[in-house]
Image (cartoon, helix red, strand yellow):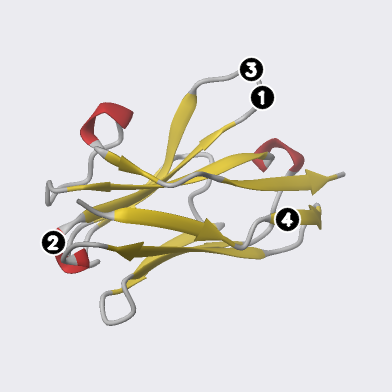
Amino acid sequence: QVQLVESGGGLVQAGGSLRLSCVASGSTFSRYGMAWFRQALGKERDIVAALTWSGISTYYADSVKGRFTISRDNAKNTVYLQMNSLKPEDTAVYYCAATRLNNLSAVTTAYAYWGQGTQVTVSS
């Protein structure tokens, strides 16, 4: 099993940037596909970005392409989400997730392990 702890959320003005971090512990981090999801108030939890074990292959939701970057540092057991040009519609709780699959899955059911979430609020 793997335990995930997110950090880096906060309040930012539109157009600003934040970097989320997710530290994993308890298992071999490099053997987990990783992803970031987000859930706005009253809405479903949706994929933001995902990457494979090596981090070479990535996936982005259309709404964040060109603004967000997902990356991982296997030596530090950490996955990052760099968020630039933030918009009010990016406001949500952001969750880090892990899967034993080495593919780019965009559905919540593919991920067995979840962090507690970190709030991102973008003011207009």
Counting from the top left corner in percent of width and height, residue 68 is at 52, 57
In the rendered structure, the answer to whether residue 54 lies left or right of residue 17 reads: left
Mark 4–mark 1 distance (CA, rounded to whole Å): 16 Å
Residue wearing tag 3: 42
Residue neighbourhood size for the residue with mark 1, other residues' Cα within 10 Å, grouped as few (<14), some (14–19), many (≥20): few
Task: Please state which of residues 99 and 1 is positioned toward the viewer in this rendering.
Answer: 1
The amino acid type found where label 1 is placed reads Leu
Q: CA distance from mark 4 to mark 3?
A: 20 Å
**SS at badge 2:** helix
Q: Which residue is mark 1?
A: 41
Of all residues, the one furthest to the right in this rendering is 124
The residue at which mark 4 appears reads as 10
At horizontal 26% and vertical 75% (from top left) the residue drawn is: 74
Say what secondary structure mark 4 lies in.
strand
Q: Is residue 74 above or below residue 110?
A: below
Q: Relative to 29, is 42 above or below?
A: above
Q: Amino acid at mark 3?
A: Gly
Dot 4 or dot 1: first in sequence order is 4
Disc 2: which residue: 31
